Image (cartoon, rainbow, N blue to C red):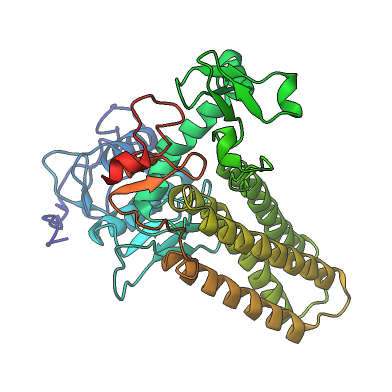
């Protein structure tokens, strides 16, 4: 108390205690209905105590480590011995305040409350070395996995800034593109921009058997790759690169979110079943099953955020996107098989613990190398290259025009100011 600036007050034995009214609202009551601190005789009713504590606990700008008597002339400390005489609500409020004060004195770094809705767990974290590039993933006892640095849900393999930008900007942008007005949607679906004059040319029924369109400017081009008929050779075959990503990153994100929610529901159902209907499984078996279900949640969450990595890093590199989609598909199949195995083991009368532990290790190792592969930027894949070409530009796979690295979409296909690759390299 001395460190907090509060001093114990000695009660005067000659003090007149006949006044048993509340010191704030002047409500008269018997001695048992009014409460004072252990070090003074200033008595208050329960209502005034509640209002006073709530004001000091949560309304003060500067956090206090101790609360003094409501009487302005008294410096007696309000401690647990006083709080325990108050209502249950006041006692719970006091406990939250003490915990809040302790967290703030730890500078908000060593101890944080789990950000999951309805979770009251507080987590103490001892950081050995801070990694500025990647998140610090924490698994709470409630099953929620979050980043210690930004307090968002775990977002490996992307950084905190990437995750924040995705949620606040990019995701809304993609959803907005999906919800475009019907007129704009029809134009994008049923027209192609002429590579000669950039005027949209409507796709009619003819294009189903004829891949070349004729514009009003007399220019002819392939509606798939935008090249002229001469560029297709003798047989008129289209050299446009195969579309390896018919499914958008947004669709994959939504599908992964559904799988993640299902994994969380299965974990919650398991926890509830253990509490309501204790099974014949041993404690070690329950622990193995719980760890397996939590691993499924972590893997599903990683696969979800790998869609953001896909959006940020492979949009203009089809080779890397194809490889990433292969890894995602393979990982998803492994997790699904592992999840089904856990269900079978849960329903079985006897758990084959060794088999489940082995599968858990295999899944963990696969995702460890998956994360490492993405951290290294999918270095195993050799990016497409063009002979005798260099400079700060990327080449569109569809029309081979050069675009600045600041552009996220090919300007040639939608902007008449785009430049030809040959012109850029001169």
Please, which residue is most extreme toward the front here? 234
Occupied quadrant, residue 364: bottom right
- In this rendering, the count of numbered labels is 0
Image quadrant containing the N terminus: bottom left
* Side (left or right) of 309 relative to 251: left
> Can residue 342 be seen from the camera position used here?
yes
Residue 225 locus on image (x, y percent): 57, 37
Front in this rendered view, residue 331 or 392: 392
Residue 130 locus on image (x, y percent): 29, 69
Image quadrant containing the C terminus: top left
Front in this rendered view, residue 110 or 52: 110
* Side (left or right) of 161 relative to 299: left
Front in this rendered view, residue 304 or 69: 304
Front in this rendered view, residue 274 or 157: 157
Task: Give the residue drawn at x 64%, y 72%.
Answer: 291
The image shows residue 281, relative to residue 91, as above or below, that is below
Residue 20 locus on image (x, y percent): 30, 36
Task: Give the residue drawn at x 53%, y 22%.
Answer: 219
Residue 134 locus on image (x, y percent): 37, 63
* Side (left or right) of 125 relative to 214: left
Occupied quadrant, residue 159: bottom left
> Can residue 82 be seen from the camera position used here?
no
The image shows residue 408, relative to residue 122, as above or below, that is above
Task: Give the residue drawn at x 51%, y 62%.
Answer: 140
């Amino acid at each position: 108390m001395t460190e907090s600036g509060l001093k114990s007050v000695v009660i005067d034995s000659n003090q007149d205690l006949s006044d048993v009214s509340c010191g704030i609202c002047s409500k008269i009551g018997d001695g048992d209905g009014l409460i004072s601190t252990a070090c003074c005789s200033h008595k208050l009713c329960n209502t005034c105590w509640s209002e006073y504590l709530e004001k000091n606990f949560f309304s003060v700008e500067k956090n206090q480590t101790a609360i003094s008597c409501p009487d302005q002339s008294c410096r007696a400390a309000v401690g647990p011995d006083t709080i325990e005489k108050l209502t249950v609500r006041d006692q719970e409020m006091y406990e939250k305040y003490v915990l809040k004060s302790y967290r703030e004195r730890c500078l908000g770094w060593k101890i944080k409350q789990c950000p999951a809705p309805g979770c009251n767990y507080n987590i103490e974290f001892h950081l050995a070395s801070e990694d500025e590039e990647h998140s610090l993933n924490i698994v709470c006892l409630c099953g929620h996995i979050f980043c210690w640095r930004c307090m968002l849900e775990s977002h490996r393999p992307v950084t905190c800034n990437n995750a924040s930008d995705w949620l606040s900007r990019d995701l809304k942008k993609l959803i907005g593109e999906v919800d475009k007005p019907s007129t704009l949607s029809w134009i994008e679906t049923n027209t192609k921009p002429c590579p000669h004059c950039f005027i949209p040319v409507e796709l009619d029924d003819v294009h189903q058997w004829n891949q070349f369109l004729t514009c009003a400017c007399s220019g002819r081009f392939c509606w798939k790759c935008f090249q002229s008929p001469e560029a297709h050779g003798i047989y008129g075959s289209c050299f446009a690169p195969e579309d390896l990503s018919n499914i958008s990153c947004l669709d994959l994100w939504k599908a992964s979110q559904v799988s993640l929610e299902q994994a969380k529901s299965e974990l919650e159902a398991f926890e509830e079943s253990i509490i309501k209907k204790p099974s014949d499984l041993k404690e070690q078996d329950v622990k193995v099953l719980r760890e397996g279900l939590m691993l499924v949640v972590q893997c599903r969450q990683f696969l979800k955020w790998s869609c953001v990595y896909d959006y940020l890093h492979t949009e203009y590199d089809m080779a890397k996107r194809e490889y990433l989609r292969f890894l995602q598909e393979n990982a998803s199949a492994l997790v699904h098989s592992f999840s089904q195995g856990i269900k079978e083991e849960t329903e079985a009368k006897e758990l084959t613990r060794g088999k489940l532990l082995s599968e858990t290790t295999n899944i963990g190792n696969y995702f460890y190398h998956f994360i490492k592969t993405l951290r290294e930027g999918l270095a195993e894949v050799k990016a497409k290259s063009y002979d005798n070409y260099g400079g700060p530009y990327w080449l569109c796979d569809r029309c081979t025009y050069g675009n600045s690295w600041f552009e996220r979409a090919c300007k040639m296909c939608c902007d008449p100011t785009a430049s030809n690759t040959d012109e850029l390299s001169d």
